[in-house]
């Protein structure tokens, strides 16, 4: 990690991920860890991270509850179902905590649906948004009473064929308002060519959507999700405005308020540069009230699908420094946290610079105290998408994840969210039970050597 101050200032300007150190058992105490220093010290004392557990994730349960409370209070008394995007932290105990906070759950696969049910979400509090739903997935959701948002008109026709007349599932249609892209193209889902939803500005698409509602009185929801990290509030609000106006047009055309709810997605960006929460949920609601004044008049129930903004700042990763070396005038600390727990940055290193895959580097040009072997480095703002969905890169075991709370007297309490994966489990997962399977296949005939 280069300690070049100028480069470090530039990385902060770009909003790159924050890395701090250090906790050095028996030597330094904590530096740069802020109020969570006590948590790191206690995690080391308890053996949750250290020589036996080289990297671990931590979830601030009190912080999660506070974030949910902030979200709910910001929306006030508007009729709204706040769902958590399961992909952001696909860990049953975390989902269970969110269910206990009164949240619903947005899922995008059969696996996420199973996790949501296992965590205790009532089917009526679950929204299924997968863009590639099979007939079996649709049948299951309709049988359970889970809400569905059809991704396209062909899927809507499939739901029509499978839907029982007495189904309790709310069914919606996802539209793409095609309002443009944010600073991260791959995180923007309302571009002209986005793969999600019915593209409203394509020739004849709007008329087809109106007709689809006219033909299906049970189709009562419109859904749109403009994008997430990198999408400014005015872009998000613009997409929701287009969706709201389409709902108004459909209801006006049909002469009845058939559309009774709007799923406005999530996507509130997270500030990774420092501890400040910006934009806030209040900023988000303020932008919506400005762009779509009628959204909060009570005629439409709302659904939200926030994920990263609820969890990112309520989690961190602690990893042990194993070696420190020099290369080309740059000081490098080798830790046990890298691409295996920062999968998204592997695919998009420019957009998610906490971990750069060029050499599997966690972060470049950070000004840190002098690091030594056995110190700990903390990666901030990693509560969403990082340790909850690790990648089996280099067959590295999945790290343990622990929830924590600090009581008023300063005592730190931990609870296991997911145990560390053992090497035996890594081997078993890689097909150990079928070790000799390929050897049992018939061997190809060896052609006779050509005669000359």
Image: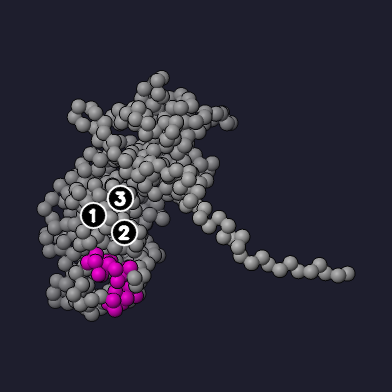
Q: Which one is earlier in the sequence, the residue at label 2 or at label 3? A: 3
Q: Position of residue 444 (x, y in %)?
A: 68, 67
Dot 1: what SS?
A: loop
- Residue at 41% over, 55% down: 186
Residue 439 is at least partly visible in this image: yes
- Between the C-alphas of marks 1 and 3, the distance is 9 Å
Q: Which residue is mark 1?
A: 120
Q: Height in image: 81 above or below 422?
A: below
Q: Position of residue 75 (x, y in %)?
A: 16, 51
Tag 1–tag 3 contact (CB < 8 Å): no
Q: Is residue 313 inside the magenta stretch?
A: no
Q: Which residue is mark 2?
A: 114
Question: In terms of secondary structure, what is the magenta stretch mainly?
Answer: helix
- Residue at 25% over, 35% down: 405
Q: Position of residue 356 (x, y in %)?
A: 48, 43
Please tell me the numbered disc located at residue 92. 3
Q: Position of residue 402 (x, y in %)?
A: 32, 39
197 lies left or right of 282: right
| Quarter-of-image position of residue 315 | top left
The front one of 409 and 178 is 409
């Amino acid at each position: 990690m280069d300690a070049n101050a100028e480069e470090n200032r530039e990385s902060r300007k770009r909003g790159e991920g924050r890395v701090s150190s250090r906790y050095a058992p028996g030597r330094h105490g904590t530096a740069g860890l802020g109020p969570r220093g006590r948590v790191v010290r206690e995690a080391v004392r308890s053996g949750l991270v250290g020589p036996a557990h080289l990297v671990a994730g931590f979830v601030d349960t009190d912080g999660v509850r506070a974030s949910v409370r902030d979200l709910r209070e910001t929306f006030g008394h508007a009729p709204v179902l706040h769902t958590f995007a399961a992909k952001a932290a696909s860990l049953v105990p975390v989902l269970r905590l969110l269910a206990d906070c009164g949240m619903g759950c947005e899922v995008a696969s059969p696996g996420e649906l199973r996790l949501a049910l296992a965590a205790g979400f009532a089917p009526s509090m679950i929204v299924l948004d997968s863009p590639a739903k099979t007939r079996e997935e649709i049948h299951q959701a309709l049988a359970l009473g889970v809400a569905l948002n059809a991704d396209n008109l062909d899927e809507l026709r499939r739901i029509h064929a499978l839907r029982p007349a007495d189904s309790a599932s709310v069914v919606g249609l996802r539209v793409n308002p095609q309002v443009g892209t944010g600073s991260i193209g791959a995180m923007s889902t309302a571009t002209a060519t986005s793969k999600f939803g019915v593209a409203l500005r394509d020739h004849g698409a709007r008329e087809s959507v109106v007709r689809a509602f006219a033909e299906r009185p049970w189709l009562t929801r419109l859904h749109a999700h403009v994008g997430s990290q990198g999408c400014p509030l005015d872009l998000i609000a613009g997409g929701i405005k287009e969706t709201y106006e389409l709902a108004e047009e459909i209801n006006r055309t049909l002469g009845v308020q058939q559309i009774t709810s709007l799923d406005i997605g999530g996507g509130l960006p997270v500030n990774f540069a420092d501890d400040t929460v910006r934009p806030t949920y209040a900023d988000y609601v303020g932008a919506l009230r400005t762009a779509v004044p009628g959204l909060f008049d009570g005629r439409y129930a709302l659904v939200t699908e926030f994920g990263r903004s609820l969890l990112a700042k309520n989690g961190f990763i602690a990893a042990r420094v194993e070696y420190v070396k020099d290369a080309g005038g740059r000081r490098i600390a080798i830790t046990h946290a890298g691409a295996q727990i920062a999968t998204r940055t592997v695919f998009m290193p420019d957009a998610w610079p906490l971990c750069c895959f060029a050499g599997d580097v966690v972060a470049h040009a950070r000004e840190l105290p002098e690091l030594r072997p056995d110190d700990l480095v903390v990666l901030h703002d990693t509560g969403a998408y990082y340790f909850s969905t690790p990648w089996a890169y280099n067959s590295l075991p999945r790290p343990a994840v622990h929830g924590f709370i600090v009581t008023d007297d300063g005592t730190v309490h931990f609870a296991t969210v997911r145990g560390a994966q053992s090497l035996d489990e890594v081997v078993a997962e890689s097909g150990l039970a079928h070790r000799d399977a390929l050897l049992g296949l018939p061997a190809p005939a060896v052609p006779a050597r050509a005669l000359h």
